[in-house]
Each structure stands twice: as C-alpha cells, then as structure tokens.
Image (tube, grey):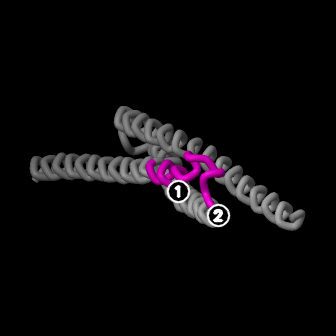
Amino acid sequence: GKALKERLGALRGRLRGDLEELRFQSMLRTAASRTAAAEEVLVTLAAAEEPFKTGLEHMTPEEASKAAAHCRAVAKTAESKVVQAGGFLKARIADIDADERTPKTKLSLASSELLQLQNQVDVVAQRLAAFQRETAQYESSVLLRDVVAQVANVEL
C-alpha cells in the first residue's frame, strides 16, 4: 500500500514536470513564431518603400500618391504584428516573474529567451517607427509637389 502510494506520487510529480516542460516549450514556440512574424514585416516595409528609392521626381503624381498610400497600409499591418508580438512577450515575461512553482533555473532560462525575443521585436519596432516617419515625409512631399503643380498651372 505505502510503496504503491510513493510510486504513484513519484509518477504524478514526473508527469507534472513533463506537463510544465511542454507548457514552456509551447509558450516559447509561440513567442518565437510571433517574433518571426514581426521580423518578416521588415521585408514588406522594404518592398513598400522601393518606389521612393528612385526619387519622387521620377514618379507621376498618381504613382506617388498610390505608393504613399501603400506604405501607410503596410505600416498599419506591420504595427499590428509588432504590437501583438510585443504584448505577448511582455505578458509571458510577467507570467514568469510571478511564477513561484517552477524551478528558478527553468524560469531564468525561459526569461532569458523571452528577453532576447523582446529585443528582436524592439528592433523591428524601431525600424517601423522610422518607416512611419519616412512615409509621412513621402506623403508631405507628394502633397507639396501637387500644390506646387497647381500653383504653376494657375500662374500660366
């Protein structure tokens, strides 16, 4: 009787540990996946910005307006992915900081991995902020060019 209870207790403890390990691995996979989705945004941002690399003067007003609108739409989608990844990571880091049941070594390892992913998302967020500033400059340039063209037409 007593030996069986001890073996069951040991088995229960091992299963609890295995379940905890699976939970951590799943959380880390999700965090890595969301971080990767945020990082993929950088490719989209670069592609959206490409028409402006040749110079605004080489674009028709319609092309410039369309490219600026596309940049704005891409930035909005990118921001959503960055916010999702950052929010998930911050919440999981807070969960780990509050976890008192899991061994500290495991928590430290998970926290370290999450902080590394958070740093990656922060880099993407900084690039996104720069992209949004550049997009605002493109839009201002497009508007200014339109106004100058209209003034020139009136003067003729």
> Residue at coordinates 49% horizontally, 48% vertically from top-left?
46
Instruction: Look at 71% across and 57% down and name the residue there.
Output: 142
Please state the extent of the stretch shown in magenta in the rendering: 43-60
Q: Residue at x 73, y 53 (%)?
A: 141
Q: Nearer the viewer, mark 1 or mark 2?
A: 2
Residue at (33% x, 50% y) in the render: 29
Q: Position of residue 27 (x, y in %)?
A: 36, 51
Q: Quadrant of residue 144?
A: bottom right
Q: Is residue 87 visible to the viewer in this orientation of the structure?
A: no
Q: Which mark is residue 78?
A: 1
How far apart marks 1 and 2 lie (CA) works out to: 20 Å
Element class at badge 2: helix
Q: In the rendering, at what x and y percent does residue 62 appear?
A: 63, 66
Q: Main secondary structure of the magenta part?
A: helix
Quarter of the image with the C terminus is: bottom right
Instruction: Name the residue nearer the viewer: 87 or 5.
Output: 87
The residue wearing badge 2 is 65
Kindly identify the amino acid type of the residue bearing the numbered disc 2.
Ser
Circle 1 residues within 10 Å: few <14, some 14–19, many ≥20? many
